[in-house]
Amino acid sequence: MPDGSQSASPPALSRSPLHERHEALGAKFAEFGGWEMPLQYSGIVEEHTAVRSAVGIFDVSHLGKVVVRGPGAVAFVNATLSNDLGRIGPGRAQYTLCLDADTGGIVDDIFSYYRDDEHVLLVPNASNNAEVHRRLAAAAPHGVEVVDHHADFVILAVQGTRSDDVLSKVGLPVGHDYLTFGEADFAGDTVIVCRTGYTGERGYELIAPSTVALPLWDAVMEAGEEFGILACGLGARDTLRTEMGYPLHGQDIGPTVTPNEARLGWAVGWKKPEFWGREAVLAEKEKGARRKLVGLVSTGRAIPRPHMSVSLVPDVLLGEVTSGTFSPSLKQGIGLALVASVVADDAEVAVDVRGRREVFKIVKPPFVDPSVRES
């Protein structure tokens, strides 16, 4: 006889406040970081092309939102996360890393928004939001509060060459420099308009209270109609970021990968006296990292996929592919791989593609010319 016990059901996936809009557009959904998010609408290649040639809109509300606030908030964040907030000031954003204090491994990669000396907004990855919040909250000094606002805000990424035209019609401020942000009123609430994104194209990210998610999405879609705007899913976001060589946490970087190995030393404030993992990554930098993250381009028609082995001829194993896809812009297979540091940056290597040894060239990303910094 059954004892009446039941196996635990998997936790329900979180949904964006815009879920009904995605359903109405016929989105195909996938799990991502504990969230049910649009994978594609009209098709990955079509959505990818819209961003490269005109404009696309992504709902990336699954990304985390952690607010650090109070006297000394900036100093506290600067003493914990890798990059140096002293390099920027209020109204600017910065890519940074949360490193493990002991190993220097990458717990998460984060965008930080320096609002003022007592207010920093952090945007971690979806699956790491709780852990980043936990570590910061546990270390925060008296008077500094660390608050998880994961479900309280939406983030819309409006990316592409016509993004300025679209947001101007909505009445939001545009034209500011890369990695800067401004604020605007929309429907009685404050929207942060950031010159950031993860596509390599000129564009913006809009951080807004969830209460205005629907009217904000509708306003952007209506304004973008004449410019050919397309709703874009995480499939196109992945091909776009891979073409730029931008790493994805959980694939290209993670707790077992250091910033030296990931070639993210530019996101480390090496001259700062303190940040989590400083001693470990400094020691590794002086000694030399044993691995490095490289780009791969197919010399034929092969498409690399994660976990495919990378080797030199005849059979010297170097490492494995971490990200791989078909590049809609280049019409060939591209990827990222973690390989032994001894291999030359322009070497030809073999990738095991379903039992076939396919030839790839090691290159330095980006694979396409970026326009993200254009004024």
Image (cartoon, rainbow, N blue to C red):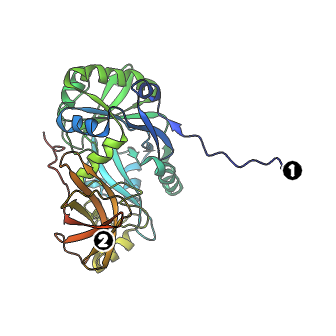
- Against 209, residue 269 (above or below) is below
Circle nearer the N terminus (2, 1): 1
Could you say where residue 252 lies in the image, as x and y percent from the top left? Answer: 35, 60
Crowding at mark 2 (Cα within 10 Å: few <14, some 14-19, many 20+): many
Residue 310 appears in the figure: yes
- Against 20, residue 176 (above or below) is below
Q: Would residue 361 appear left or right of 238 to someone viewing this image?
A: left
Q: Quadrant of the C terminus?
A: top left
Residue furthest to the front: 356
Q: Quadrant of residue 67?
A: top left
Could you say where residue 346 lies in the image, as x and y percent from the top left? Answer: 16, 69
Camera-nearest label, 2 or 1: 1
Crowding at mark 1 (Cα within 10 Å: few <14, some 14-19, many 20+): few
Element assignment for label 1: loop
In the image shown, does 225 or 357 lie closer to the viewer? 357
Could you say where residue 286 lies in the image, as x and y percent from the top left? Answer: 28, 78
In the image shown, does 217 or 242 lie closer to the viewer? 242
Disc on res. 339: 2
Residue furthest to the right: 1
Name the residue: 24% across, 77% down.
313
Residue type, label 1: Met
Q: Which residue is mark 1?
A: 1
- Against 62, residue 162 (above or below) is above
